[in-house]
Amino acid sequence: MIGKKYFNRKNAGRAGAVILTLFLIIFFLNCAYKILQNDYSVKKFKMFFSGKTDYEVMFFGSSHVINSVFPMQLYNDYGIASYNMASHNSRIPATYGTFKLSLKYKKPKIAVLDVLWGNGKANSTKLDSAHKIFDAFPPSVSKFAVLSEIFKESSWDENDEKRPNVMELLNPFSLYHSRWAEKDIKLSSLFDFSYNRELGAESRIAVSVPDNFKLVDKDSVSSFEFEYYWIEKFITYCRDHDIIPVLIAVPFPATEYDQYVIKGVEDVSKKFDVPFINLFYENTVDFDTDCYDKNSHLNPSGARKVTDYLGRYLSENFNLTDYRSNPKYAKNWNEWYADYKALLHENLKRQNNLKNVLMLLNNSNFTAEIKISDRYKLDEVEQKLVSQVSEACSLQNVSYEKNENCDVAIAVFDANTRKPVDNIFFNKDSSGALVKVDMSENKAIEDARVLYKNTARLDVKNCGAADNAIEILTNSSNNKFECPSWYKTETGVGQWLHSDEKSVDFSFKCIGNGNLEILLRGKDFHDNKGARIPMKVNYTKLMINDEVIFSEPKTVWHDQSFKWTKLVQDGELIKVHVEWEACEN
């Protein structure tokens, strides 16, 4: 009996040891697999593999799509749940493979394919690019079948090290068995929980004007013959799985040959009766302002325009769910969008180039005020960028004035919260080049005090019901009254005016019975840590309906304003005259 108990304990101990050993082997193999995976691929697709949402639209293609379609913008502006599945240097066969593998995990309603490099059957995707595309997809029979299919014919020679190897792509251990140096092995990747905050997209930040791009005539016919084998397979596979295929061509400074390859897809579109949106002919972008590099990709300004076009097209032509009002998913999406907005702010703060700053301000998440000294002359591209900023975000004003302290000053705010994002200053250096002023320096704050010493801010609101407002009738200022989102509340809609003109006359009509408030303030300015810095102004005179309210100087700043109130009736007319002067801060 004792021997039997001992035997059972001994067997149990051996079994436990075997189980523990197997667990440790699996654990370490899993860790090793994660370390050996391509880090880029893992981060790009991390949110795709997340079970926190469905994606009704997926975008497929090369880096042109990565840099041109922003899923987070589609969510915020149209409620579309989408993912950018495109990959760098992904030729159409590899893109087709990505599409097939993705359906094992999530099935979209619509699959959007960019048709660049759609001609031919051989796969010219390089090995390093293939790792970025496929490493995130776990090894499986399906993955082996897809890789075998798409790399059956390759444009690379058998012995060329750029030619993808199916077994290597299926199992990363095989790569590092003989070529360890190709992988910078980092244990830290096991504890890296970061993800692509743009849901597969990537912002390439620069402004570059292409050389001599010529758009081929829309009705011209090519003398070339093209084969669209993989595009046709993509369409067929979509329909076999009840997915709507949509073909697009993202605009870029393409060669004449590439443009004809793209135009040839019109025949495929007609043959299969699928939509084809050739954005080269839709006047969506301006290559002077919207290119990251001279020959290829769009920057975030161009991407926002392409994304907006596609968002309108998809929402108007297909029955898609508005995920903004979907209680099952809205919480996650809103959290992701908050992370995305933080990324937009970070990208803006990192810029040291005026063109890049202006380009990134082509974004409805920002409001901005721009001051430009008469010493600095905007070039043609910068003028275009300023012009499109005024259309895209709530640009409070662009003023050109004589200023010895600063050549260009840009105050940026969050459009929804009105919280400051950044104060950006540029000055010419001794060589004449425009250089960003480091906001950590006290001199930048002193420059700001000189720059904004004449800036008055007038806030006007008819407080009462939510639909209370004012209607501006006359305004002597060169600047317009604005209605920022934070000034729209349950007590009514307010407007404000910024001016450096030292006096202003305006009149308005009150809409709704209420308590009229007029606040005289200074510029709302923050340092690089977010602390508000007083920008003082001396108001010397205020008249309401020809009645003098005061005529002695009153020194104010943002947090210490002068407030005048009056009970008003619906339709009541108010006439205001204000004078002010600079104040030594």
Image (tube, rainbow, N blue to C red):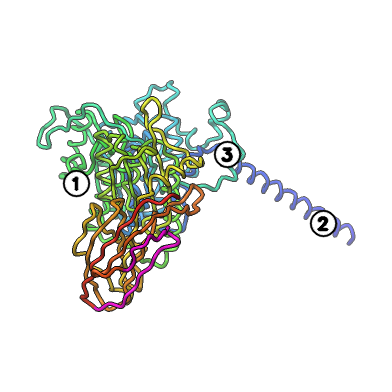
Q: Which mark is residue 272?
A: 1
Which element is circle 1 on?
helix
- Mark positioned earlier in the residue sequence (3 or 2): 2
Q: Is residue 392 above or below residue 155?
A: below
Q: Is residue 534 left or right of residue 473?
A: right
> Which residue in the structure is indicated by mark 3?
35
Quadrant hosting residue 518: bottom left
Kind of residue sitting beneath label 2: Arg
Kind of residue sitting beneath label 1: Phe
Disc 2 residue crowd, few under 14, some 14–19, many 20+, Cα 10 Å = few
- Image quarter of the N terminus: bottom right
Which element is circle 2 on?
helix
Mark 3 or 2: the one toward you: 3
Labels 3 and 2 touching (C-beta < 8 A): no
Q: Is residue 102 left or right of residue 237?
A: right
User: Going 59% across and 36% down the picture, which residue do you hit?
Assistant: 186
Q: Is residue 216 left or right of residue 423?
A: left
The Cα atoms of the two marked residues, 3 and 2, are separated by 38 Å
Mark 1 or 3: the one toward you: 3
Is residue 365 magenta-colored? no
Q: Which mark is residue 9?
A: 2
- Number of marks drawn: 3
Tell me, yes or no, if residue 306 can be seen here. Answer: no
Kind of residue sitting beneath label 3: Ile
The magenta segment is 549-569
Residue 514 percent coordinates (x, y):
30, 77
For the residue pair 262 and 30, the one nearer the viewer reads as 262
